[in-house]
Amino acid sequence: HAYAMWAIIPPVISAMFASYTMFAFVAFLHFLDARSLDTQIVECISMLTGFFAQKKNNQGRRKAQMHQKSEKKRTSRAPGSALLLREVTDSEENEDIHSDGKSAVSSNCSYNAELAKQQQSSLEGVHRQNALEKELCDLIVDVMQKKFGSVQSRIDHTCKSVGNLWLHLVFFSTCQVLAISTSAVMHASGAIKADYKWWWAFQDFFHLGGGLVLLAACMGVFCIVTSFMQRLTLRISEVIGTTGCPFTMQATILGLVSARPLGMHVLWGSTYIDASKALIFFGVTLVTVVHSMMYVANYVDLSV
């Protein structure tokens, strides 16, 4: 084994260092890409916030103007109404009041016509506002969909290129950890008919510790990007609720953003490496190692 390792170790260690460095580098690039996407999404949502805040102010201003005009017209019609209600005693006063009543009726008709015109103008303004709102919503949805699609397409290209190598290294490190754990148990139980040399502990410790570190690195570089991309969806759902936009628009944006899984994946996009999968896999491996070490400690204690 020692003679063979003189020829095997240099290319294997070099290839592993190069592979893990490449994983870390491309994951860092995708992480920066996702951070840039986060900034762009916040800018898009701020546009919605400004639009709906202005819409709310315009509606309040329009209601205040209509209320002021209504009060002004009602005040201007008061003298005519008082003349109609005043008791008359002579014909001249009756004629004056009759003429004032006519002017009040004509003023009332002109007021109704003006009020109808204002209502029509208000309806047209609401229609234009709704059309502009729909156009802005379609624009924001299209921009966000393209941004998410472009970032995820670059991640897909990377996963397609290095996914098989990532699986190979995970399998290699897992077998390395299991081999050392099983070997220690077999030595302790006497299944291997050979005396355990104390210096073998150095290579076992190196391979066992190195395998666990490489597994953590392999899982970590992929799940960091996946977790950040998944948090973007949650961030959008939290921030978009403060914009004041209708719930239908919020549902449309969130539905398009979360229409497909996001992040790093292997096995042709069927398995996304997120924090939950990484913790479960690493936890099971660590429990297996601890169980083997406890098994060895029991055998040693019984032999002593």
Image (cartoon, rainbow, N blue to C red):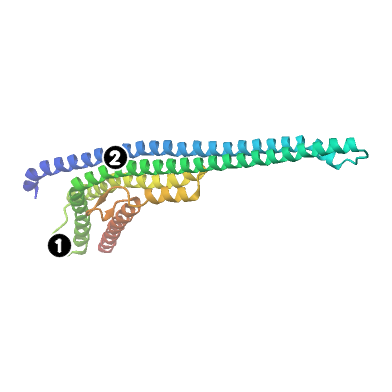
- Residue 116 percent location from the top left of the image: 63, 42
Q: Separation of disc 2 and disc 1 at Cα?
A: 48 Å
Q: Earlier in the sequence, mark 2 or mark 1?
A: 2
Q: Is residue 49 above or below residue 160?
A: above
Q: Nearer the viewer, residue 301 or 242?
A: 242
- Residue 254 percent location from the top left of the image: 41, 49
Instruction: Tell me, yes or no, if residue 82 can be seen here.
Output: no
User: Residue drawn at (6%, 46%), measured in percent from left and top?
Assistant: 3
Specify the amino acid type for callout 1: Ile
Mark 2 or 1, which is nearer the eye? 2
Answer with left or right where residue 266 lies relative to residue 83. left
| Quadrant in the picture for the C terminus | bottom left
| Residue at disc 1, secondary structure | loop
| Disc 2: which residue | 30
Q: Nearer the viewer, residue 89 or 165?
A: 89
Specify the amino acid type for callout 2: His
Mark 1 neighbour class, 10 Å CA radius: few under 14, some 14 to 19, many 20 or more: few
Mark 2 neighbour class, 10 Å CA radius: few under 14, some 14 to 19, many 20 or more: many
Instruction: Tell me, yes or no, if residue 139 can be seen here.
Output: yes
Q: Nearer the viewer, residue 123 or 301?
A: 123
User: Residue drawn at (21%, 42%), measured in percent from left and top?
Assistant: 20
Q: Nearer the viewer, residue 169 or 130?
A: 130
Answer with left or right where residue 75 lies relative to residue 39. right
User: Residue drawn at (75%, 41%), measured in percent from left and top?
Assistant: 105
| Residue at disc 2, secondary structure | helix
- Residue 37 percent location from the top left of the image: 36, 38
Q: Which label is found at residue 192?
A: 1
**How many dots with numbers?**
2
